[in-house]
C-alpha cells in the first residue's frame, strides 16, 4: 500500500482531509447500518439540536504504524465506553460498542495510506463524534442523531520534543459541581475557550483548574488530566467527581503500577502541596504526557525541580513505556492494541 506524498516529519497538529469517513444516522429509535463516504460535509437543519442546545459529544484516539509495519489503534473499546456514558448523560442514543470499534477499524483501513510511517513522529488522529441533527426549538433532546468518525494525519504535539509548560492557577471554573465535568461533552470545551485564549495572551500555556466548590483542590486543565510526582518518586493524581476519566491517564497509571513498580495514589490534592512535588505533567491523547516546568498562582511562581528543559525522570520513564507499547516496541497488556487487518 503506497503512502500519501506528504512531508510526514513536518506535519502540524491540524485538520487534513482524508479519503473516507464513517457516517451512521439515528432515526425512528434505531441506528441505520452506517457507511463510509467520500463526502466530508455535514448537512443539518438550521434548527438542529446541536446548533440550538449544544447536544454533541466527541472522542479522540489515534492509529499508529508499529515498528513491524503493522497499523494499530489503542484501546478504542474504552473510547466507546466513555462515549456511551456521555451519551446517557446528554440524553443521546448510545452507539453500540461493537459497532464503534468496527467503525474505527473501517475508517483506519480505508485511510491506510494516510497513516504516517513508523519513526516519523506522526500519527492518524481519529475523531468519533455525535450530534443532535433534527430540529429542536423547545428545550428538549433531539429525535434524530448522526454519528461520524473522520481521520486526519497529525504531527507530534510538540515540534522538536516536549518543552515543559508554564501554567497558571485559574480563577474561572472548568465545570460546575455535579455538572458535566466528568463527560466528554462539547460544551465543556466551549466553556474553556475564553480562558485558554486569555492564558495565552498573558504568556501561559494552559490553565490549571481548581475544584469548583472550594477553589482549594487541583482538578485538571482545559483538555487534560494531571499527574504529579513526589520527591521520593511516587505518582499522585487528583481525585474528583468532575474530572474527565482520561484513557491516557488510566493507561499511564496502569503502566506505572503494573510494569514499572511505581506507587500510584489517586486523592484530593490541595494547591498548597504544589511546591512539594518534583515533577508534573498533563496527560491526554494528543501528546500522551506534556511536562510542566512552572505553575503560577496569582504571581507566586512554583518551579518544579524537573526544570524547564525536559521531562522529569519518572514521567519520562512512564511516557517511554506507554509510547513503546503503542509503537510495538514493548509488549502491551492483552486487549490494549487493536490491529487493523
Image: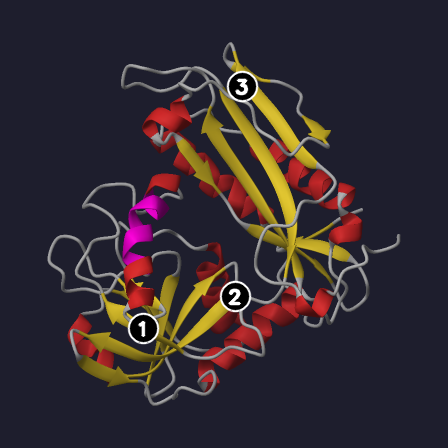
Q: Position of residue 306 (x, y in %)?
A: 39, 88
Residue 179 vertical position relative to residue 163 in the rendered view, above or below: above
Asked if residue 24 is among those painted magenta in the image, a careful observer would answer no
Residue that numbered label 3 is attached to: 26
Residue that numbered label 2 is attached to: 287
Q: Position of residue 7 (x, y in %)?
A: 74, 65
Where does the magenta region start and end?
A: 188-196
Give the structural element (helix, strand or loop) at label 3.
strand
Residue 258 vertical position relative to residue 20 in the rendered view, above or below: below
Q: Which residue appears at 59% of the width and 50% of the height? A: 15
Residue 91 vertical position relative to residue 134 in the rendered view, above or below: below
Nearer to me, 101 or 332 = 101
Q: In this rendering, which labeled residue sits more in front, label 2 or label 1?
A: 1
Query: Residue 321 is drawn in which quadrant?
Result: bottom right
Give the structural element (helix, strand or loop) at label 1.
loop
Nearer to me, 99 or 124 = 124
Q: Position of residue 130 (x, y in %)?
A: 49, 32
Mark 3 packing: few (<14 Cα in 10 Å), some, or many (20+)?
A: many
Label placed on residue 203: 1
Amino acid at each position: 500500500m503506497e503512502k500519501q506524498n506528504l512531508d510526514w516529519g513536518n506535519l502540524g497538529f491540524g485538520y487534513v482531509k482524508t479519503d473516507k469517513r464513517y457516517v451512521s444516522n439515528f432515526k425512528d429509535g434505531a441506528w441505520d447500518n452506517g457507511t463510509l463516504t467520500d463526502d466530508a460535509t455535514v448537512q443539518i437543519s438550521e434548527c438542529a439540536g446541536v446548533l440550538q442546545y449544544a447536544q454533541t459529544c466527541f472522542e479522540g484516539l489515534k492509529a499508529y504504524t508499529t515498528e513491524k509495519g503493522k497499523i494499530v489503534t489503542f484501546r478504542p473499546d474504552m473510547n466507546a465506553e466513555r462515549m456511551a456514558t456521555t451519551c446517557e448523560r446528554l440524553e443521546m442514543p448510545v452507539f453500540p460498542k461493537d459497532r464503534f470499534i468496527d467503525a474505527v477499524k473501517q475508517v483506519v483501513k480505508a485511510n491506510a495510506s494516510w497513516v504516517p510511517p513508523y519513526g516519523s513522529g506522526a500519527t492518524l488522529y481519529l475523531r468519533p463524534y455525535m450530534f443532535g441533527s433534527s430540529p429542536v426549538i423547545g428545550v428538549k433532546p433531539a429525535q434524530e442523531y448522526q454519528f461520524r468518525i473522520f481521520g486526519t494525519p497529525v504531527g507530534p504535539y510538540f515540534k522538536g520534543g516536549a518543552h515543559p509548560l508554564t501554567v497558571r492557577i485559574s480563577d474561572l471554573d472548568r465545570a460546575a459541581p455535579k455538572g458535566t465535568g466528568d463527560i466528554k461533552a462539547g460544551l465543556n470545551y466551549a466553556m474553556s475557550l475564553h480562558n485558554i485564549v486569555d492564558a495565552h495572551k498573558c504568556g501561559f500555556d494552559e490553565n490549571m483548574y481548581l475544584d469548583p466548590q472550594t477553589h482549594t483542590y487541583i482538578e485538571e486543565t482545559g483538555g487534560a488530566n494531571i499527574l504529579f510526582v513526589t520527591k521520593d518518586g511516587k505518582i499522585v493524581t487528583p481525585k474528583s467527581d468532575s474530572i474527565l476519566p482520561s484513557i491516557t491517564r488510566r493507561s499511564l497509571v496502569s503502566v506505572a503500577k503494573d510494569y514499572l513498580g511505581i506507587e500510584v495514589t489517586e486523592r484530593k490534592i490541595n494547591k498548597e502541596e504544589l511546591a512539594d512535588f518534583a515533577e508534573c505533567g498533563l496527560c491526554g491523547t494528543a501528546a500522551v504526557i506534556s511536562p510542566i516546568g512552572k505553575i503560577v498562582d496569582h504571581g507566586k511562581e512554583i518551579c518544579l525541580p524537573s526544570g524547564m528543559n525536559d521531562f522529569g525522570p519518572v514521567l519520562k520513564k512512564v511516557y517511554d513505556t506507554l509510547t513503546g507499547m503503542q509503537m510495538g516496541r514493548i509488549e502491551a497488556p492483552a486487549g490494549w492494541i487493536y490491529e487493523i487487518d
